[in-house]
Amino acid sequence: MKFCRTIIITSLAMMAGTVAIAATDLEIALEDGGTVLTSDEIADLITSKVVTAKAGDKTFRFFYDPSNVLNGELQGGGWSGSGAYAITDGNQVCVSMAKDAGRYRCLTVVRQGETVRKFNADGKATFELLEIEPANGL
């Protein structure tokens, strides 16, 4: 009987919208005033640029060639690679490095004040863009 009561209460709470669901990093950024960059804004931001980005305690530099080639390196050594990127009409940048074996990972780019971050398909923050500079490649 107690089990049935718990199911009924839980069901009613869910229907009423009172069950708390954890927000993703992306949802939090948007609730805090962040805005999703459009495809044109993403292109202006990264194409033909060297982007220094932080993921956790690691800092990377990526060159986004206008021919959709992506080159990257871990600052301090230990990794470098190349792949491809594409900016979609759906306001995302998608990347595929060698380890992705041809699969593209699409990321949403959000500006929140002076901070620009990328978020994966699950809404988890992946990279914070620290510096963006015009360049001729890495």
Image (tube, grey):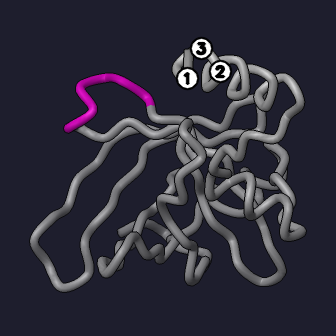
Report x, y in % for residue 76. 18, 85
Check disc 1 and report its element: helix, strand or loop. Answer: helix
Residue drawn 54% across the image and 39% down it: 122
In the rendered structure, does residue 138 fall within the stretch colored magenta? Answer: no
**Residue tagged by mark 1?**
2
The magenta segment is 99-104
* Label 2 crowd (10 A; few <14 / some 14-19 / many >=20): few
Marks 2 and 3: in contact by CB < 8 Å?
yes
The CA distance from mark 1 to mark 2 is 5 Å
Amino acid type assigned to the residue bearing label 2 in the image: Arg
Q: Quadrant of residue 115?
A: bottom right
Marks 2 and 1: in contact by CB < 8 Å?
yes
Q: Which mark is residue 31?
A: none
The CA distance from mark 1 to mark 3 is 6 Å
Marks 3 and 1: in contact by CB < 8 Å?
yes
**Residue tagged by mark 3?**
4
**Residue tagged by mark 2?**
5
